[in-house]
Amino acid sequence: MASAASPSWVILGSVPRVLSAAAADTDLPPGVANFSLALPAPPRVALLTIPARIYPDRASSRRSPTVIAADPSGLILLHSEQGRRATGPTITDTPGHQGVSWWPYLDAYFLLDATATASAAFLLPKPELLSGPGFIGLIASPKGYMVAELQPVFGSDKAQLLRFSSQVGEWVRQSSVAYPLPCHSWRGADGVLSYSGRLWWVDLSWCLLTCNPFADEPTLTVVHLPEGKVLKPREASGLLDKYRCVGVSAGKLRFVDMYRNRDSRNGAAQISVWTLDDHPVGSWTLEYEATFTEICDDPSYKATGLPRKIPVLALIHPTNPDVVYFFLDGHLFGVDVRARKVVHCEVYELVEPPMEKVASRFVQACLLPPALCSGSAKETDDGVDEELQRLHLREENEE
């Protein structure tokens, strides 16, 4: 899947392209039975392509397969429904867990290995044990990988952690994990990150929960958002991922915020980037802020031809924390926020959603493993310089 021009990281679209059975025979590379992954350099979007046998239902704007997580090892965790249930509810009766699910669709979770020669897709067993993709994370280590789902019991001081590791090969339930948020309705379905040997469950309105899933007795730790950034319950529900995101950049955890974020001097809308120090119980440090007026006034922004509008937040660059990406009018553009300069700009291609519904959850910044990466950090920086030069040339020509 790597080519001579493969970058060191990609912007991965969260919704894959689904091929019909006939199209899969011709569009998937020879010898690849399960999926393919194109690797264009940012700001173009990398799209996963899967055949209908992995997602046999009809994809739509309301229901489609979803990339839950992508690890720098080349592993991709995919949620893919398998059509409607033929009969009644699913009854789960296992040690430590009994339940009935009336969800009308059959869930499936696939672990894809983008580095494997035959692009292997492994179907995780017993999907009925899982509550849904919002609380599931993927983490790799030198000894293998682990998929883990946090299952809070709201109102209780205990939670369950369901773990599947490559070493054990089956789901193991940890039923008595101390839960530090017993009295708050933590929605926590804004993604799960892998960072520094831990999984981080994100609630963009309030806090992060983190633990080492490989530990024999995992301990959950709560990390609140920076002071003044915690919202009221249900505030901006369904909208926050347009204006906030949490991501890993240059080996540190970053919080990017645009939501009701105003410059104290003039009230202008602005973006702020914070860094978590001394995880997992450290504090947040404000790295920089910039108003969108300052960004739009720069010649590099004028050269893009984009309107002077507040964009939608996409992601933070995984190796350069000064660069943040945004959606606006069908374009995905990167800004060196500290310098107030546009460094990338291009029309983007996503399977879903339509342009008016884009948000940070529909893309992921993914570092590539050596097997897929022929680029380097320097090549990425050179690409930024070339894009800057192109934008400046466009501006000069227009003048």
Image (tube, rainbow, N blue to C red):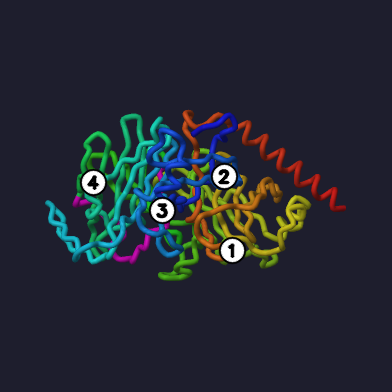
Secondary structure beneath dot 4 equals loop
* Residue 395 image offset from top left, x and y in percent: 81, 50
Reading the image, the residue beneath label 2 is 317
Q: Of marks 2 and 3, which one's residue comes earlier in the chain? A: 3
Query: On residue 217, which mark appears?
Result: none
Q: Nearer the viewer, mark 4 or mark 1?
A: 4
In this picture, residue 217 sits left or right of residue 363: left
Query: On residue 261, which mark appears?
Result: 1
Query: Going 49% across and 36% down the picture, which residue do you hit?
Result: 368
Query: Going 25% across and 50% down the picture, which residue do you hit?
Result: 161
Magenta range is 175-194
Disc 2 to disc 4, C-alpha distance: 34 Å
Disc 4 to disc 1, C-alpha distance: 44 Å
Q: Residue furthest front?
A: 22
Query: On residue 66, which mark appears?
Result: 3
Q: Looking at the picture, which amino acid does disc 2 mark?
A: His
Disc 4 to disc 3, C-alpha distance: 18 Å
Query: Going 73% across and 53% down the picture, which residue do you hit?
Result: 304
Q: Of marks 4 and 3, which one's residue comes earlier in the chain? A: 3
* Residue 94 image offset from top left, x and y in percent: 13, 53
Residue 82, quarter of the rendered image: bottom left
